[in-house]
Protein backbone atom coordinates (compact mmCIF):
# COMPACT_ATOMS: atom_id res chain seq x y z
CA UNK A 1 0.00 0.00 0.00
CA UNK A 2 1.24 3.49 -0.79
CA UNK A 3 2.17 5.86 2.01
CA UNK A 4 -0.08 8.96 2.28
CA UNK A 5 2.50 11.21 0.64
CA UNK A 6 3.74 8.76 -1.98
CA UNK A 7 3.11 9.51 -5.63
CA UNK A 8 2.72 7.17 -8.57
CA UNK A 9 1.44 7.15 -12.13
CA UNK A 10 -2.29 6.52 -12.32
CA UNK A 11 -4.08 5.49 -15.48
CA UNK A 12 -7.62 6.37 -14.36
CA UNK A 13 -8.32 9.62 -16.18
CA UNK A 14 -11.55 10.14 -14.20
CA UNK A 15 -9.44 11.36 -11.30
CA UNK A 16 -8.35 14.50 -13.10
CA UNK A 17 -9.96 17.12 -15.26
CA UNK A 18 -8.48 16.85 -18.73
CA UNK A 19 -5.60 14.71 -19.95
CA UNK A 20 -2.17 15.93 -20.90
CA UNK A 21 -1.21 13.61 -23.76
CA UNK A 22 1.98 14.05 -25.74
CA UNK A 23 2.16 12.93 -29.36
CA UNK A 24 5.77 11.86 -30.03
CA UNK A 25 7.13 13.53 -33.16
CA UNK A 26 8.94 10.32 -34.05
CA UNK A 27 5.74 8.30 -34.39
CA UNK A 28 4.13 11.04 -36.44
CA UNK A 29 7.15 11.12 -38.77
CA UNK A 30 7.16 7.34 -39.07
CA UNK A 31 3.46 7.26 -39.83
CA UNK A 32 3.79 9.82 -42.61
CA UNK A 33 6.72 8.07 -44.24
CA UNK A 34 5.23 4.60 -44.16
CA UNK A 35 1.84 5.90 -45.32
CA UNK A 36 3.52 7.25 -48.43
CA UNK A 37 4.55 3.75 -49.45
CA UNK A 38 2.40 1.01 -50.91
CA UNK A 39 1.35 -1.35 -48.13
CA UNK A 40 -0.76 -4.47 -48.16
CA UNK A 41 -4.05 -4.15 -46.23
CA UNK A 42 -2.88 -6.63 -43.57
CA UNK A 43 0.36 -4.71 -43.08
CA UNK A 44 -1.55 -1.49 -42.70
CA UNK A 45 -3.79 -3.14 -40.11
CA UNK A 46 -0.81 -4.46 -38.12
CA UNK A 47 0.91 -1.13 -38.35
CA UNK A 48 -2.15 0.79 -37.07
CA UNK A 49 -2.55 -1.59 -34.14
CA UNK A 50 1.11 -1.09 -33.29
CA UNK A 51 0.82 2.68 -33.47
CA UNK A 52 -2.22 2.64 -31.17
CA UNK A 53 -0.29 0.56 -28.69
CA UNK A 54 2.70 2.89 -28.82
CA UNK A 55 0.50 5.96 -28.36
CA UNK A 56 -1.31 4.27 -25.49
CA UNK A 57 1.99 3.53 -23.79
CA UNK A 58 3.15 7.09 -24.44
CA UNK A 59 0.01 8.47 -22.86
CA UNK A 60 0.60 6.40 -19.75
CA UNK A 61 4.18 7.62 -19.47
CA UNK A 62 3.25 11.23 -20.19
CA UNK A 63 0.60 11.54 -17.49
CA UNK A 64 1.71 13.58 -14.50
CA UNK A 65 2.31 11.87 -11.14
CA UNK A 66 -0.25 11.72 -8.35
CA UNK A 67 0.49 12.45 -4.72
CA UNK A 68 -1.96 11.09 -2.16
CA UNK A 69 -2.57 12.51 1.30
CA UNK A 70 -4.98 11.31 3.97
CA UNK A 71 -5.63 13.94 6.61
CA UNK A 72 -7.67 13.81 9.79
CA UNK A 73 -8.54 17.19 11.28
CA UNK A 74 -9.05 17.27 15.05
CA UNK A 75 -8.83 19.53 18.03
CA UNK A 76 -5.94 18.87 20.37
CA UNK A 77 -4.04 20.44 23.23
CA UNK A 78 -0.58 21.90 22.81
CA UNK A 79 1.48 24.07 25.11
CA UNK A 80 1.85 27.42 23.37
CA UNK A 81 3.36 30.41 25.19
CA UNK A 82 3.71 28.24 28.32
CA UNK A 83 -0.04 27.63 28.41
CA UNK A 84 -2.05 24.55 27.32
CA UNK A 85 -4.27 25.67 24.46
CA UNK A 86 -6.75 24.11 22.06
CA UNK A 87 -5.34 23.98 18.55
CA UNK A 88 -6.36 22.43 15.24
CA UNK A 89 -4.25 19.41 14.32
CA UNK A 90 -3.84 17.60 11.02
CA UNK A 91 -2.83 13.99 11.62
CA UNK A 92 -1.88 15.05 15.12
CA UNK A 93 0.52 17.72 13.85
CA UNK A 94 0.64 21.42 14.66
CA UNK A 95 1.32 23.00 12.20
CA UNK A 96 0.03 20.51 9.65
CA UNK A 97 2.25 18.46 7.31
CA UNK A 98 3.92 20.22 4.42
CA UNK A 99 3.00 19.28 0.87
CA UNK A 100 6.10 18.83 -1.30
CA UNK A 101 5.45 18.34 -4.99
CA UNK A 102 6.66 19.15 -8.50
CA UNK A 103 5.14 21.29 -11.25
CA UNK A 104 2.04 19.63 -12.75
CA UNK A 105 1.73 16.97 -10.05
CA UNK A 106 -1.83 15.93 -9.27
CA UNK A 107 -2.69 16.39 -5.61
CA UNK A 108 -5.30 14.17 -3.93
CA UNK A 109 -6.09 15.13 -0.32
CA UNK A 110 -8.75 13.23 1.59
CA UNK A 111 -9.83 15.35 4.56
CA UNK A 112 -11.80 13.86 7.45
CA UNK A 113 -13.38 16.55 9.62
CA UNK A 114 -13.50 15.48 13.26
CA UNK A 115 -14.20 18.97 14.55
CA UNK A 116 -17.64 19.81 15.91
CA UNK A 117 -18.38 22.28 13.12
CA UNK A 118 -18.07 22.53 9.32
CA UNK A 119 -14.59 22.96 7.94
CA UNK A 120 -12.72 23.80 4.72
CA UNK A 121 -9.09 24.15 3.68
CA UNK A 122 -7.98 26.62 1.00
CA UNK A 123 -4.74 26.31 -0.94
CA UNK A 124 -3.25 29.77 -0.74
CA UNK A 125 -1.76 30.70 -4.12
CA UNK A 126 -2.54 27.44 -5.94
CA UNK A 127 -4.26 28.68 -9.08
CA UNK A 128 -6.70 25.79 -9.53
CA UNK A 129 -6.52 25.93 -13.31
CA UNK A 130 -10.01 24.92 -14.54
CA UNK A 131 -10.82 23.51 -11.08
CA UNK A 132 -12.48 26.33 -9.15
CA UNK A 133 -14.43 23.60 -7.34
CA UNK A 134 -11.29 22.79 -5.34
CA UNK A 135 -10.53 26.30 -4.07
CA UNK A 136 -11.88 25.56 -0.62
CA UNK A 137 -13.76 28.77 0.23
CA UNK A 138 -17.45 29.21 0.96
CA UNK A 139 -18.08 30.98 -2.32
CA UNK A 140 -17.12 27.83 -4.24
CA UNK A 141 -17.54 24.93 -1.81
CA UNK A 142 -20.04 23.69 0.73
CA UNK A 143 -18.07 23.02 3.92
CA UNK A 144 -17.21 19.50 5.03
CA UNK A 145 -19.76 18.55 7.73
CA UNK A 146 -18.51 17.26 11.09
CA UNK A 147 -17.77 13.55 11.13
CA UNK A 148 -17.47 13.25 7.34
CA UNK A 149 -14.75 13.19 4.71
CA UNK A 150 -14.22 14.96 1.42
CA UNK A 151 -11.47 14.61 -1.17
CA UNK A 152 -9.77 17.53 -2.91
CA UNK A 153 -8.43 16.72 -6.40
CA UNK A 154 -6.39 19.35 -8.22
CA UNK A 155 -3.18 19.90 -10.14
CA UNK A 156 -0.18 22.14 -9.46
CA UNK A 157 -0.53 23.16 -13.08
CA UNK A 158 2.24 25.34 -14.51
CA UNK A 159 3.36 26.53 -11.07
CA UNK A 160 6.53 26.55 -9.05
CA UNK A 161 7.26 28.22 -5.75
CA UNK A 162 6.43 28.75 -2.11
CA UNK A 163 2.83 28.60 -0.91
CA UNK A 164 0.77 27.44 2.03
CA UNK A 165 -2.65 26.17 3.01
CA UNK A 166 -4.96 27.00 5.91
CA UNK A 167 -8.59 26.72 7.10
CA UNK A 168 -10.94 29.18 5.40
CA UNK A 169 -13.98 28.68 7.64
CA UNK A 170 -14.87 31.12 10.48
CA UNK A 171 -11.78 31.84 12.62
CA UNK A 172 -10.27 28.34 12.43
CA UNK A 173 -7.12 29.76 10.90
CA UNK A 174 -6.28 31.37 14.26
CA UNK A 175 -6.09 27.90 15.85
CA UNK A 176 -3.76 26.18 13.38
CA UNK A 177 -4.59 23.77 10.58
CA UNK A 178 -2.04 25.48 8.34
CA UNK A 179 1.03 24.13 6.58
CA UNK A 180 3.51 24.70 3.79
CA UNK A 181 2.86 23.91 0.13
CA UNK A 182 6.07 23.86 -1.91
CA UNK A 183 6.25 23.23 -5.66
CA UNK A 184 9.66 22.33 -7.08
CA UNK A 185 10.63 22.89 -10.71
CA UNK A 186 10.69 19.95 -13.10
CA UNK A 187 14.18 18.59 -13.69
CA UNK A 188 14.07 19.71 -17.34
CA UNK A 189 13.49 23.36 -16.38
CA UNK A 190 16.56 25.34 -15.34
CA UNK A 191 16.41 27.50 -12.23
CA UNK A 192 18.32 30.81 -12.19
CA UNK A 193 20.58 29.98 -9.24
CA UNK A 194 22.72 27.07 -8.02
CA UNK A 195 20.68 24.27 -6.48
CA UNK A 196 20.83 24.69 -2.69
CA UNK A 197 22.03 21.88 -0.45
CA UNK A 198 18.70 21.72 1.37
CA UNK A 199 15.49 23.63 2.00
CA UNK A 200 13.81 24.78 5.20
CA UNK A 201 10.14 25.79 5.47
CA UNK A 202 9.35 28.47 8.05
CA UNK A 203 5.72 29.28 8.84
CA UNK A 204 5.53 32.50 10.82
CA UNK A 205 2.24 33.18 12.58
CA UNK A 206 0.84 35.58 15.11
CA UNK A 207 -0.86 33.99 18.11
CA UNK A 208 -3.65 34.88 20.54
CA UNK A 209 -3.81 33.17 23.93
CA UNK A 210 -7.58 33.61 24.06
CA UNK A 211 -8.26 30.99 21.36
CA UNK A 212 -10.16 31.11 18.09
CA UNK A 213 -13.63 30.69 19.60
CA UNK A 214 -13.13 33.69 21.89
CA UNK A 215 -11.81 35.71 18.94
CA UNK A 216 -14.88 34.77 16.91
CA UNK A 217 -17.17 35.75 19.76
CA UNK A 218 -15.51 39.16 20.09
CA UNK A 219 -15.82 39.79 16.35
CA UNK A 220 -19.45 38.66 16.33
CA UNK A 221 -20.12 41.23 19.05
CA UNK A 222 -18.57 43.98 16.95
CA UNK A 223 -15.32 44.28 18.88
CA UNK A 224 -11.90 44.86 17.36
CA UNK A 225 -9.13 42.43 18.21
CA UNK A 226 -6.16 43.56 20.27
CA UNK A 227 -2.56 43.11 19.17
CA UNK A 228 -1.63 39.40 19.20
CA UNK A 229 0.14 38.04 22.23
CA UNK A 230 3.13 36.70 20.34
CA UNK A 231 4.64 35.44 17.11
CA UNK A 232 5.49 31.79 16.48
CA UNK A 233 7.81 30.06 14.00
CA UNK A 234 6.47 26.66 12.98
CA UNK A 235 4.03 26.73 15.86
CA UNK A 236 6.76 26.90 18.48
CA UNK A 237 7.13 29.55 21.16
CA UNK A 238 10.60 28.16 21.92
CA UNK A 239 13.27 28.42 19.23
CA UNK A 240 13.25 25.82 16.47
CA UNK A 241 16.66 24.78 15.14
CA UNK A 242 17.91 24.58 11.54
CA UNK A 243 21.35 23.05 10.97
CA UNK A 244 23.68 23.58 8.01
CA UNK A 245 27.32 23.25 7.04
CA UNK A 246 29.75 26.13 6.70
CA UNK A 247 30.29 27.17 3.08
CA UNK A 248 27.00 25.63 1.88
CA UNK A 249 23.91 27.48 0.60
CA UNK A 250 20.39 26.75 1.81
CA UNK A 251 16.94 27.83 0.68
CA UNK A 252 14.57 29.21 3.31
CA UNK A 253 10.89 29.21 2.30
CA UNK A 254 9.11 31.76 4.50
CA UNK A 255 5.34 32.23 4.72
CA UNK A 256 3.36 34.63 6.88
CA UNK A 257 0.44 32.43 7.93
CA UNK A 258 -0.77 34.78 10.66
CA UNK A 259 -4.20 36.37 10.75
CA UNK A 260 -3.33 40.05 11.16
CA UNK A 261 0.36 40.94 11.55
CA UNK A 262 3.02 41.93 9.03
CA UNK A 263 6.47 40.66 9.94
CA UNK A 264 10.10 41.46 9.27
CA UNK A 265 12.40 38.46 8.78
CA UNK A 266 16.20 38.36 9.20
CA UNK A 267 19.08 36.09 10.19
CA UNK A 268 21.82 37.31 12.47
CA UNK A 269 25.15 37.72 10.70
CA UNK A 270 23.82 36.65 7.28
CA UNK A 271 22.31 38.28 4.21
CA UNK A 272 19.19 37.05 2.44
CA UNK A 273 19.26 36.66 -1.35
CA UNK A 274 15.69 36.87 -2.57
CA UNK A 275 15.08 34.39 -5.40
CA UNK A 276 11.33 33.78 -5.51
CA UNK A 277 8.06 35.42 -4.50
CA UNK A 278 4.91 33.29 -4.68
CA UNK A 279 5.93 31.44 -7.80
CA UNK A 280 7.86 34.21 -9.57
CA UNK A 281 11.65 34.21 -9.84
CA UNK A 282 12.93 37.63 -8.82
CA UNK A 283 16.00 39.73 -9.48
CA UNK A 284 18.44 38.38 -6.92
CA UNK A 285 18.83 41.34 -4.61
CA UNK A 286 20.52 40.90 -1.23
CA UNK A 287 18.71 42.11 1.90
CA UNK A 288 19.59 42.43 5.55
CA UNK A 289 15.91 41.86 6.34
CA UNK A 290 12.63 41.40 4.47
CA UNK A 291 9.06 42.46 5.19
CA UNK A 292 6.56 39.65 4.64
CA UNK A 293 2.93 40.73 4.97
CA UNK A 294 -0.07 38.62 5.94
CA UNK A 295 -0.66 35.81 3.44
CA UNK A 296 2.61 36.34 1.56
CA UNK A 297 5.45 33.92 0.86
CA UNK A 298 9.07 34.35 -0.22
CA UNK A 299 12.11 32.16 -0.78
CA UNK A 300 15.64 33.29 0.03
CA UNK A 301 19.09 31.76 -0.30
CA UNK A 302 21.41 31.93 2.70
CA UNK A 303 25.08 30.99 2.43
CA UNK A 304 26.73 29.96 5.69
CA UNK A 305 29.92 32.01 5.53
CA UNK A 306 30.28 33.18 9.13
CA UNK A 307 32.13 31.67 12.07
CA UNK A 308 31.02 28.22 13.22
CA UNK A 309 28.49 28.95 15.98
CA UNK A 310 24.76 29.44 16.38
CA UNK A 311 22.86 32.49 15.09
CA UNK A 312 19.41 33.89 15.74
CA UNK A 313 16.72 33.70 13.10
CA UNK A 314 14.38 36.58 13.94
CA UNK A 315 10.81 37.49 13.03
CA UNK A 316 9.35 40.67 14.49
CA UNK A 317 6.06 42.45 13.96
CA UNK A 318 5.67 45.55 11.81
CA UNK A 319 3.41 48.52 12.57
CA UNK A 320 2.30 47.21 16.00
CA UNK A 321 2.58 48.53 19.52
CA UNK A 322 4.23 46.78 21.25
CA UNK A 323 6.64 45.14 18.81
CA UNK A 324 6.43 41.34 18.98
CA UNK A 325 9.57 39.25 18.43
CA UNK A 326 10.23 35.54 18.12
CA UNK A 327 13.37 33.61 17.27
CA UNK A 328 14.66 30.35 15.87
CA UNK A 329 18.25 29.11 15.66
CA UNK A 330 20.55 28.71 12.64
CA UNK A 331 23.12 26.20 13.82
CA UNK A 332 26.39 25.51 12.05
CA UNK A 333 27.30 21.83 12.07
CA UNK A 334 29.88 21.24 14.81
CA UNK A 335 28.92 24.38 16.73
CA UNK A 336 29.25 24.39 20.49
CA UNK A 337 28.59 28.12 20.83
CA UNK A 338 25.05 29.35 21.52
CA UNK A 339 23.74 32.48 19.79
CA UNK A 340 24.53 35.78 21.42
CA UNK A 341 22.67 39.04 21.85
CA UNK A 342 21.89 41.62 20.63
CA UNK A 343 19.37 40.57 18.02
CA UNK A 344 19.85 42.19 14.63
CA UNK A 345 17.89 45.43 14.42
CA UNK A 346 15.00 45.93 12.02
CA UNK A 347 12.41 48.56 11.10
CA UNK A 348 9.35 48.78 13.31
CA UNK A 349 6.83 51.50 12.35
CA UNK A 350 8.64 52.76 9.25
CA UNK A 351 6.06 52.64 6.46
CA UNK A 352 8.11 54.29 3.74
CA UNK A 353 11.04 51.96 4.44
CA UNK A 354 8.73 49.06 3.65
CA UNK A 355 7.28 50.70 0.55
CA UNK A 356 10.75 51.49 -0.75
CA UNK A 357 11.83 47.89 -0.23
CA UNK A 358 8.68 46.62 -1.98
CA UNK A 359 9.60 48.60 -5.08
CA UNK A 360 13.00 46.84 -5.25
CA UNK A 361 11.35 43.41 -5.60
CA UNK A 362 11.26 42.91 -9.36
CA UNK A 363 10.69 40.09 -11.81
CA UNK A 364 13.64 38.23 -13.31
CA UNK A 365 12.70 38.64 -16.98
CA UNK A 366 15.17 36.11 -18.38
CA UNK A 367 14.52 33.30 -15.91
CA UNK A 368 12.18 30.39 -16.59
CA UNK A 369 9.41 29.63 -14.15
CA UNK A 370 7.26 26.52 -14.55
CA UNK A 371 7.60 26.57 -18.33
CA UNK A 372 10.75 26.93 -20.46
CA UNK A 373 9.76 30.33 -21.85
CA UNK A 374 11.26 33.31 -19.97
CA UNK A 375 9.05 35.11 -17.45
CA UNK A 376 9.55 38.34 -19.40
CA UNK A 377 7.95 36.93 -22.55
CA UNK A 378 4.54 38.08 -21.30
CA UNK A 379 4.68 41.81 -21.94
CA UNK A 380 1.97 42.87 -19.49
CA UNK A 381 2.87 46.56 -19.82
CA UNK A 382 1.88 46.64 -23.50
CA UNK A 383 -1.58 45.07 -23.13
CA UNK A 384 -4.67 47.25 -23.40
CA UNK A 385 -6.64 47.39 -20.14
CA UNK A 386 -10.23 46.20 -20.61
CA UNK A 387 -11.59 47.27 -17.22
CA UNK A 388 -10.47 49.31 -14.21
CA UNK A 389 -11.74 48.55 -10.70
CA UNK A 390 -10.99 50.75 -7.69
CA UNK A 391 -11.75 48.99 -4.41
CA UNK A 392 -11.72 51.03 -1.19
CA UNK A 393 -11.84 49.31 2.20
CA UNK A 394 -13.71 50.90 5.11
CA UNK A 395 -14.55 50.12 8.72
CA UNK A 396 -18.18 50.92 9.49
CA UNK A 397 -21.01 50.21 11.89
CA UNK A 398 -23.92 48.18 10.47
CA UNK A 399 -26.80 47.43 12.81
CA UNK A 400 -24.69 48.85 15.61
CA UNK A 401 -21.77 46.44 15.11
CA UNK A 402 -18.37 46.79 13.50
CA UNK A 403 -18.17 45.54 9.93
CA UNK A 404 -15.61 45.92 7.17
CA UNK A 405 -16.72 46.80 3.65
CA UNK A 406 -15.51 47.27 0.09
CA UNK A 407 -17.10 50.08 -1.90
CA UNK A 408 -20.02 50.26 0.49
CA UNK A 409 -20.78 46.53 0.65
CA UNK A 410 -19.91 44.21 3.54
CA UNK A 411 -19.81 40.63 2.34
CA UNK A 412 -22.00 37.93 3.90
CA UNK A 413 -21.71 34.32 2.74
CA UNK A 414 -25.05 33.04 1.42
CA UNK A 415 -26.05 29.51 2.47
CA UNK A 416 -25.53 28.40 -1.14
CA UNK A 417 -22.02 28.77 -2.58
CA UNK A 418 -21.93 31.34 -5.35
CA UNK A 419 -20.32 28.96 -7.83
CA UNK A 420 -22.97 26.28 -7.34
CA UNK A 421 -25.72 28.89 -7.74
CA UNK A 422 -24.06 30.15 -10.90
CA UNK A 423 -23.53 26.72 -12.42
CA UNK A 424 -27.03 25.41 -11.68
CA UNK A 425 -28.80 28.72 -12.37
CA UNK A 426 -30.21 28.96 -8.86
CA UNK A 427 -31.95 32.34 -8.42
CA UNK A 428 -31.90 34.51 -5.33
CA UNK A 429 -28.36 33.76 -4.19
CA UNK A 430 -26.48 36.71 -5.67
CA UNK A 431 -26.88 39.46 -8.22
CA UNK A 432 -24.16 39.98 -10.77
CA UNK A 433 -22.51 43.37 -10.45
CA UNK A 434 -24.19 43.79 -7.08
CA UNK A 435 -21.51 46.24 -5.96
CA UNK A 436 -19.93 49.32 -7.44
CA UNK A 437 -16.44 49.03 -8.89
CA UNK A 438 -15.46 52.51 -7.67
CA UNK A 439 -15.63 53.92 -4.11
CA UNK A 440 -18.96 55.24 -2.81
CA UNK A 441 -19.90 57.74 -0.12
CA UNK A 442 -23.03 55.96 1.09
CA UNK A 443 -23.34 53.87 4.28
CA UNK A 444 -22.30 50.25 3.85
CA UNK A 445 -24.87 47.48 3.53
CA UNK A 446 -24.68 43.72 3.97
CA UNK A 447 -24.78 41.39 0.98
CA UNK A 448 -23.02 38.96 -1.37
CA UNK A 449 -20.67 40.98 -3.55
CA UNK A 450 -19.93 39.74 -7.08
CA UNK A 451 -18.22 41.61 -9.90
CA UNK A 452 -18.62 40.31 -13.45
CA UNK A 453 -15.80 39.97 -15.99
CA UNK A 454 -15.23 38.11 -19.25
CA UNK A 455 -12.72 35.31 -19.66
CA UNK A 456 -9.38 36.80 -20.82
CA UNK A 457 -10.22 40.32 -19.65
CA UNK A 458 -7.07 42.27 -18.79
CA UNK A 459 -7.97 44.26 -15.67
CA UNK A 460 -6.41 47.06 -13.65
CA UNK A 461 -7.31 46.89 -9.95
CA UNK A 462 -6.49 49.71 -7.55
CA UNK A 463 -6.71 49.01 -3.83
CA UNK A 464 -7.44 52.28 -2.04
CA UNK A 465 -6.74 52.31 1.69
CA UNK A 466 -7.95 55.42 3.49
CA UNK A 467 -7.50 53.85 6.91
CA UNK A 468 -4.49 54.19 9.20
CA UNK A 469 -3.73 50.45 9.24
CA UNK A 470 -1.93 48.30 6.70
CA UNK A 471 -4.03 46.08 4.43
CA UNK A 472 -3.22 42.84 2.62
CA UNK A 473 -5.25 41.62 -0.39
CA UNK A 474 -5.33 38.15 -1.95
CA UNK A 475 -6.85 37.03 -5.27
CA UNK A 476 -7.55 33.35 -5.86
CA UNK A 477 -7.30 31.64 -9.23
CA UNK A 478 -4.44 33.61 -10.69
CA UNK A 479 -1.45 35.81 -9.98
CA UNK A 480 -1.10 39.51 -10.80
CA UNK A 481 1.56 42.12 -11.50
CA UNK A 482 2.11 44.70 -8.78
CA UNK A 483 2.65 47.78 -10.92
CA UNK A 484 2.56 50.56 -8.35
CA UNK A 485 2.47 51.77 -4.75
CA UNK A 486 1.72 55.31 -3.66
CA UNK A 487 0.56 57.59 -0.87
CA UNK A 488 -2.80 59.28 -0.41
CA UNK A 489 -5.60 58.86 -2.96
CA UNK A 490 -5.06 57.24 -6.37
CA UNK A 491 -6.04 59.04 -9.56
CA UNK A 492 -5.42 58.32 -13.23
CA UNK A 493 -2.25 60.43 -13.34
CA UNK A 494 -0.61 57.87 -11.05
CA UNK A 495 -0.35 55.52 -14.02
CA UNK A 496 2.71 57.47 -15.13
CA UNK A 497 4.50 55.96 -12.15
CA UNK A 498 3.61 52.34 -12.91
CA UNK A 499 6.32 49.75 -13.46
CA UNK A 500 5.36 48.39 -16.88
CA UNK A 501 8.50 46.30 -17.41
CA UNK A 502 9.47 44.03 -14.52
CA UNK A 503 6.83 44.26 -11.78
CA UNK A 504 6.77 41.15 -9.64
CA UNK A 505 3.97 38.65 -10.13
CA UNK A 506 2.30 37.37 -6.96
CA UNK A 507 -1.08 36.46 -5.40
CA UNK A 508 -1.11 38.64 -2.26
CA UNK A 509 -0.16 42.32 -2.00
CA UNK A 510 0.07 44.85 0.81
CA UNK A 511 -1.55 48.30 0.80
CA UNK A 512 0.09 50.77 3.14
CA UNK A 513 -1.84 53.07 5.52
CA UNK A 514 -3.55 56.00 3.75
CA UNK A 515 -2.11 54.78 0.46
CA UNK A 516 -2.89 52.76 -2.66
CA UNK A 517 -1.55 49.77 -4.56
CA UNK A 518 -2.24 49.02 -8.24
CA UNK A 519 -2.12 45.65 -9.98
CA UNK A 520 -2.62 44.32 -13.51
CA UNK A 521 -4.24 40.90 -13.87
CA UNK A 522 -5.04 38.71 -16.86
CA UNK A 523 -8.24 36.87 -16.01
CA UNK A 524 -7.51 33.72 -17.99
CA UNK A 525 -8.91 31.18 -15.51
CA UNK A 526 -12.67 30.74 -15.67
CA UNK A 527 -14.46 30.55 -12.34
CA UNK A 528 -15.71 32.42 -9.27
CA UNK A 529 -12.62 33.77 -7.54
CA UNK A 530 -12.31 35.19 -4.05
CA UNK A 531 -10.75 38.65 -3.74
CA UNK A 532 -10.31 39.02 -0.01
CA UNK A 533 -8.51 40.70 2.79
CA UNK A 534 -5.79 38.34 3.94
CA UNK A 535 -6.15 39.95 7.36
CA UNK A 536 -8.61 37.41 8.67
CA UNK A 537 -10.71 39.44 11.14
CA UNK A 538 -11.43 41.91 8.33
CA UNK A 539 -12.28 39.14 5.91
CA UNK A 540 -14.52 37.46 8.51
CA UNK A 541 -16.42 40.72 9.00
CA UNK A 542 -16.99 41.43 5.34
CA UNK A 543 -13.87 42.73 3.55
CA UNK A 544 -14.06 40.43 0.55
CA UNK A 545 -15.86 39.91 -2.74
CA UNK A 546 -15.89 37.51 -5.67
CA UNK A 547 -14.84 38.10 -9.27
CA UNK A 548 -16.83 36.03 -11.74
CA UNK A 549 -14.69 35.18 -14.77
CA UNK A 550 -17.05 33.90 -17.42
CA UNK A 551 -17.84 33.13 -21.03
CA UNK A 552 -20.88 31.42 -22.56
CA UNK A 553 -19.01 28.35 -23.75
CA UNK A 554 -18.93 25.25 -21.60
CA UNK A 555 -15.70 23.47 -22.37
CA UNK A 556 -13.38 21.24 -20.38
CA UNK A 557 -10.53 23.24 -21.89
CA UNK A 558 -11.59 26.30 -19.84
CA UNK A 559 -13.46 24.89 -16.84
CA UNK A 560 -14.18 21.44 -15.47
CA UNK A 561 -17.65 20.22 -14.62
CA UNK A 562 -18.49 19.89 -10.92
CA UNK A 563 -16.62 16.82 -9.64
CA UNK A 564 -18.59 13.64 -8.83
CA UNK A 565 -18.10 14.17 -5.08
CA UNK A 566 -19.45 17.75 -5.04
CA UNK A 567 -21.07 18.65 -1.72
CA UNK A 568 -24.43 20.40 -1.89
CA UNK A 569 -25.97 22.76 0.63
CA UNK A 570 -28.41 25.66 0.88
CA UNK A 571 -30.55 25.85 -2.25
CA UNK A 572 -28.20 23.58 -4.21
CA UNK A 573 -29.67 20.08 -4.12
CA UNK A 574 -27.54 18.47 -6.80
CA UNK A 575 -28.13 17.66 -10.46
Image (spheres, rainbow, N blue to C red):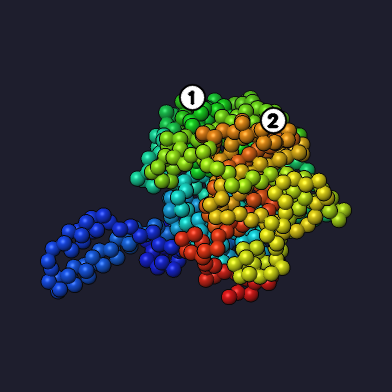
Q: Residue 307, position in %: x, y?
A: 48, 24
Q: Residue 271, position in %: x, y?
A: 52, 27
Query: Which quadrant would the C terminus be assigned to in this image?
Result: bottom right
Q: Residues within 10 Å of mark 1 (few under 14, many from 20)?
A: some
Q: Which residue is mark 2?
A: 351
Decide which of 74, 447 is in the foreground and name it: 447
Query: Which quadrant would the N terminus be assigned to in this image?
Result: bottom left
- Give the left or right position of residue 445, taking residue 518 as reference: right
Q: Would you say residue 116 is visible in this rendering?
A: no
Q: Which residue is mark 1?
A: 306
Decide which of 165, 454 is in the foreground and name it: 454
User: Residue shown at 69%/69% (left/top)?
Assistant: 427
**For the residues marked 2 and 1, what is the alpha-carbon distance in whole angstroms?**
31 Å
Q: Is residue 555 above or below residue 322?
A: below
User: Residue shown at 53%/37% (left/top)?
Assistant: 381
Decide which of 36, 73 is in the foreground and name it: 36
Decide which of 480, 340 is in the foreground and name it: 480
Q: Residue 366, position in %: x, y?
A: 42, 35
Q: Name, please, the residue furthest toward the right.
A: 400
User: Residue shown at 22%/70% (left/top)?
Assistant: 49
Q: Quadrant of residue 55?
A: bottom left
Q: Secondary structure at mark 1?
A: loop
Q: Is residue 284 above or below residue 525?
A: above
Q: Quadrant of residue 573?
A: bottom right
Q: Residue 560, position in %: x, y?
A: 50, 64
Disc 2, disc 1: CB below 8 Å?
Answer: no
Q: Residues within 10 Å of mark 2 (few under 14, many from 20)?
A: some
User: Residue shown at 59%/47% (left/top)?
Assistant: 386
Amino acid sequence: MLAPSESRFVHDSSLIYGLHILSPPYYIWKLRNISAQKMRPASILYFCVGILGLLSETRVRAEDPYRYYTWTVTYGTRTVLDKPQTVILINGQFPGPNIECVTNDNIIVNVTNKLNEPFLITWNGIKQRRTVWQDGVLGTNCPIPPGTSWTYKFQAKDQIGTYNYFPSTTMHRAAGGFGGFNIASRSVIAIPYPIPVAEFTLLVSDWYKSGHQALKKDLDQGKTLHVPDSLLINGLSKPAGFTGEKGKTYKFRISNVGISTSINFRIQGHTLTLVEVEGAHTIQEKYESLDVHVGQSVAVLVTLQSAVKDYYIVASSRFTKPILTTTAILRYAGSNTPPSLPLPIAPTYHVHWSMKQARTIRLNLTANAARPNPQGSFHYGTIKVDKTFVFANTAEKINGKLRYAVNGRSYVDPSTPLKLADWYNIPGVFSLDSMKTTPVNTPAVLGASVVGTELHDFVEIVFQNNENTIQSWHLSGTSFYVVGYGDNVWNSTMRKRYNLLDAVSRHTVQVYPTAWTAIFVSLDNKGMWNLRSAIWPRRYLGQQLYIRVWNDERSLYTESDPPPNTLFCGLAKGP
